[in-house]
Amino acid sequence: MKKGNQLIFVKIISIGAGVFAISGLIPWFQHDPESAKFTAYLLGGGLLLWQVRASSKRAKAAEDTAKAMQKTADATEKGNIAERFKNAIEHLGHESASVHLGGIYALHHIAREEEDYRARIFEILCAHIRETTTQDGYKLQKIPIPEDIYPQEEDVFIIPEPSIEIQSILDLLFIRTPDREAYEGFHANFCYANLVGARLQKANLQKASLSNTILPYADLQDAILTGANLVNATLMNTNLQRANLTGTNLQGACLMYTNLQDANLQESILIGANLQEIDLTGTDLHDAYLNKANLQKTKLIETNLQGTFLIDTNIQGAEILSSNLENVHLQKANLQGARFDNSNLQRAEMIDANLQSVNFDNSHLQGVNFDNSNLQDAKFYNSNLQGARFINANLQGTKLINVRNLTVEQFLQAKTLYKAELPDGMEEKIKQQRPELLEKPQPDNKQGP
């Protein structure tokens, strides 16, 4: 007999026995109603417990069945995702660009659905960019732009852009939209990649590895590049307006003609960087390192250079107007012909600096150290020189008329004041104490090695 039929048979026998037993007790129950009531309660409770137990077994059996089904479904789903992942990777290696693009979007959809795959897919797509853009056969798109944006002899200048495939990956990985937050917290590696003309506005490239990356004409406006490594990167004609570059390493980077207006470069490293002729208006370079950088003819209007290191830097002809250079380090810097109109240079260090023909008009120069500096033909009209030092400084032809808070004692250890234009009454006082300062200096007789 089958197990199911056996259970039914047992139940029938049990019920029959119960009925028989109760029928035999009926006459006794008629004489003792309380015993009858108690027996009824007892039998009813037992029946209820039996039903609860039976229901519990059925529920557990149903739960076990559901778990088994879910486990089977999960295994099937994982198998499907693994198969989808494998197919997407194979598409990336296909000869057709359209098939590549399909594989890229397939990987992106898997990353959105499965957290376990996200880091791996992110690394795969970054590696695909590096490998593709460094191949000899990689072809950029070309977009014509008007002559007035970038003047050329030709009527139209052709600006390169990434291929559709590469730009699509960049959009998926870094342009923040609600459905593209799967890669949040991952740090890209694009070392040596060719990202000429890439569109990366507002992209999150925090702590990205971009050393030796080629980024001319790229649009990184409002991008987040905090802590990124851009050592020796090429950023000519790149748009970094309002970009956050706090703590970024730009050592040796080429930034010629780059737009850094209102960018945040606090504590960034720009040692040896080329920033020639770029516009740094409104840029925050607080505590940044620009030692030995090239800032020739750069615009630094309303720029924050407080505590910035510019030691041995070339700043010839730069316009540093209405800027904050408090506690700036300009030792051995070449500032010939630069302008500091209306700027704050309090307690700046300018030891051994070349300040020939520099304009300091209307500037705050309290406590500045000009020791051993060349201030020939420099202009200080209406500047505040309280506590400034000029030990062994060359002040030949320097314009010091209408300066504020300047004393004779500040000049007594200078190298020369020959043909300097001094405040009223100061020349006579110097004649009384060190008349040789006003005489033509003797030629330097030092012989070279």
Image: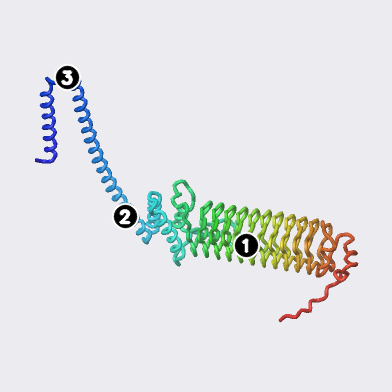
Provide the residue designation for mark 1.
289
Counting from the top left corner in percent of width and height, residue 76 is at 29, 50
Name the quarter where the N terminus is drawn.
top left
The residue under label 3 is which amino acid type? Asp
**SS assignment at label 3:** loop
**Dividing the picture into quarters, in which one does residue 290 lie?**
bottom right
Q: Nearer the viewer, mark 3 or mark 1?
A: 3
Provide the residue designation for mark 2.
83
The residue under label 1 is which amino acid type? Tyr
Q: Which one is nearer the viewer's eye here, 157 or 60? A: 60
10 Å crowding of disc 2: few (<14), some (14-19), many (20+): few
Counting from the top left corner in percent of width and height, residue 129 is at 45, 60
Mark closest to the chain's N terminus, 2 or 3: 3
Q: Name the residue located 70 percent from the left edge and 57 percent from the top edge.
A: 326
Provide the residue designation for mark 3.
32
Q: Is residue 277 above or below residue 54?
A: below
Q: Left or right of 279: which side holds 396?
A: right
**SS assignment at label 1:** loop
The residue under label 2 is which amino acid type? Glu
Mark closest to the chain's N terminus, 2 or 1: 2
10 Å crowding of disc 1: few (<14), some (14-19), many (20+): many
Q: Left or right of 320: which side holds 408?
A: right
CB contact under 8 Å: marks 2 and 3: no
Q: Nearer the viewer, mark 2 or mark 3?
A: 3
